[in-house]
Image (cartoon, grey):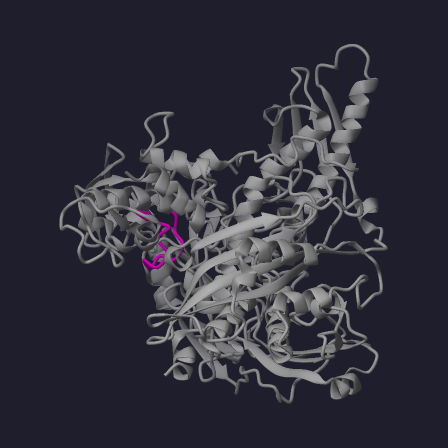
Amino acid sequence: MSQAPPPLGTPAARREGRDKVTGTARYAAEHTPPGCLYGWPVPATIARGRVSAVHTDEALALPGVHAVLSHDNAPRLKQPDDPILAVLQDDRVPHRGWYIALVVADTLDHARAGAEALRIAYETTEHDVVLSENHPGLYTPETVNGEYPAVRERGDADRAFAMAPVQVDATYAIGALHNHPMEPHASTAQWTQDGHLHVHDSNQGSTTVRESLAAAFGLRPQQVTVVSEHVGGGFGCKGTTRPQAVLAAMAARHTGRPVKIALPRRQLAAVVGHRPPTVQRLRLGAELDGTLTSVSHEVITQTSTVKEFVEQAAVPARIMYGSAHSRTTHRVTALDVPSPSWMRAPGEAPGMYALESAMDELAAALGIDPVELRLRNDPADEPDSGRPFSSRGLAACLEEGAARFGWYDRDPRPAVREEGPLLVGTGVASATYPVYIAGSSASAHAATDGSYRIQVNATDIGTGARTVLAQIAASVLNTPVENIRIDIGSSELPDAPLAGGSSGTASWGWSVHKASTALLRQLRECTGPLPAEGLTIFADTEQETSEKSPYARHAFGAQFAEVAVDSRTGEVRVRRMLGVFAAGHILNPRTARSQFIGGMTMGIGMALTEGSTMDPVFGDFTESDLASYHVPVCADVPEIEVHWIDEDDPHLNPMGSKGIGEIGIVGAAAAVGNAVRHATGVRLRSLPLTPDTLLPYLL
Amino acid sequence: MDPSRGRDDGAQQPGATGDRSTLTLHINGTEQTLTLDHRTTVLDALREDLGLTGAKKGCDHGQCGACTVIVDGRRANSCLLLAVAHDGARITTVEGLADGDRLHPVQEAFLDRDALQCGYCTPGQICSAVGMLGEAADGFPSHVTTRTAPVSAPAPLDAPEIRERMSGNLCRCGAYPRIVEAIEDVAP
């Protein structure tokens, strides 16, 4: 497959755009079946212990309150596939915010009032919620998120580091981060008389949620329908089934009426996952010419007592730079905290902040330009596995980015560019994200009027899935995209994996490509008119996608940032950002550009504004709403320039694409942090770079 | 389960009592008389009682702007407005911006610039932009307006002005640069 055929690669407009700008696109909480009740979940207000009593009298006496569910009376679940879904099953409180009850009423106002009237008695136990580098509970897990080994070593990293003429030994810390998609998680659930469960749910994959609800309620998957037509963002926290879906289904069964639950924003931090805090020690040893001889990346992080999730922050160091000696390790401790989970580029986002900051420190120690240092250590094969790269565009991204950004105009000395009270600087960092793919199924239908219909249970969380899948089908069927109808967002459609790991387009697209290809072949063989019902072909890619590639497959990128730091206030403003990415063929430049910009924007938040702290006394995330957890606003985001290098990589999938949803955040925070160091001479090793942390060094 | 346009089971319909009042809202040019719980916000009345789900609930606390609508000509976070306190108000939601099939210029610009991804903040962004353009035309200054700008004359809208004035509307997908471009397209 050399050149992707048109209309792939063309900037087709978002198919659901008109519905979204006119307000007619409906999200999960916007389905109100007749007789619908409202659920209001009640979070635990202790950090650890048990619920000793749920006093429901006052709540049930309020107008409109239909039921209070708690572990005393909630339907028993069979086998939830994720322990975070085992809500209202026992009296245990594993962390603050864990759901312990649900009030169901005829209106939102009545449900909320009922929740406030509920009296809960607890037995509290001492809690342990603060991660530290010497926490006694730290252990080395078998694997980390993504099923990578927790530990990888080659050579003798300690010895090589000790012998290296130039060394960097630095520890970086990032606090918890929250996904906070604009649409809070929501579900509207209804049971029909035949025992079928219908759910409108906000998630990143309704095949996954269907399987999960079926397991929880002891149903066959065919007895569950999950619809996710429009989803208001996810960024990982809707990649797995979340408690609101289970609670809504429980309450609907208990009351015999449809029940809608939209989670209040302030409850999200405790129940929908978050990026866990990491403490990352980097040790880089190099020769005087910049050649890396030793790379150590040692990560400490936390999980909950409910489940083990280990942020794989040291994994990108296994593929980024060549070095004869390396050690990458993860240790984790289970605390009485909410369960962490996926947040945009788990592993890569925090890990590349640390690695790319350390590379900047090494460049300064060596007196070598940071772009040049990265180019000198660009390996021919994947350092950890020795496998050849299917394509590796890092050097090209760095070189093109440096030229476009005007990188080489910079004076490398720190803290020498003053504009009145402002200190100005520039920074660079590399980006990478792995190529993931999963088996998917799809159907392609040719109608007698010459139009086509593609069905696949893809989910559009804002990526433009409908649009790009129609382009893929149109390119195979050699027809205008307008001639393709596409159905996604329901578990009644052919099964498909979730929108996660930047794998959606590749996974769904391959099955659409395969079904369309088979349909085209059949159409060509078909002599005479089509049967009245048309022709339908079903395809799945389980076999193709389960074959392990002999190649190391990753997307790469380079991030450049210019910042101005106010020496009077410590405020950092990003003036401009520029990213260049190498991610295979870009299938839709219009929607792809939006995703890259979006990732880089979230990276600005990670660098400058987003931070969440664990209150040691209450065991609670202090910044649990959007007034205290500062996602970037319009005024924080300057012009962001995005370019890409179109790669012709034959080892990916029939479209030749790599995922693009996550790489935009990777390296962005490091580029900003490195620019702040260049501007001020101050190297802070924890995020976010808020004025209060920076100002003491500027006075 | 088919979506229905708002409640039809009468849960909100009993007459006015000590906790409820009957009031009239003029929504997108249509008079709507409702009897509502005094705690009901304009946002919940729109979404749950009238089936107008264009205005979104992102935080319910006035922190995100997803619920922005235009009330008596000015943009407002509808989650912070109690419906009972807005008897007689004229409210325009995102559903009321287009003229039949012809989109409002701001809606058209958002499509042209791909100024949206998940779409959940989009109705609020669009209503906010429409309101903001009105404020600027009426000479409202912003935090970044220069002190020497003439009072009461229309405020010129360059990118920094637009960014500042649109910073009450969060977008987690990161469509801000595209949103600014879209608004620049329609700004005078």
Give the main secondary structure of the magenta stretch.
Answer: loop
Q: Residue at x 72, y 75 (%)?
A: A289
A431 or A51: nearer the eye? A431
Hey, which quadrant is residue A448 in on the image? Answer: top right
Hey, which quadrant is residue A19 in on the image? Answer: top left
In the figure, B79 relative to A334: above or below?
Answer: above
Q: Give how far across and how far down residue B188 sits, in percent.
A: 28, 38
Tell me, yes or no, if residue B16 can be seen here.
no
Q: Give how far across and how far down residue A442 sits, in percent.
A: 71, 37
Position of A668 with respect to A289 (left or right) is: left
Instruction: Say which quadrant the N terminus of chain A sits in.
Output: top right
Hey, which quadrant is residue A191 in on the image? Answer: top right
Q: Residue at x 34, y 25 (%)?
A: B100
For this orientation, the residue located farthest to the top is A528
Magenta span covers which residues? Answer: B52-68
Position of A54 with respect to A164 (left or right) is: left
Q: Within the magenta stretch, is there residue B103?
A: no
B102 or A578: nearer the eye? A578
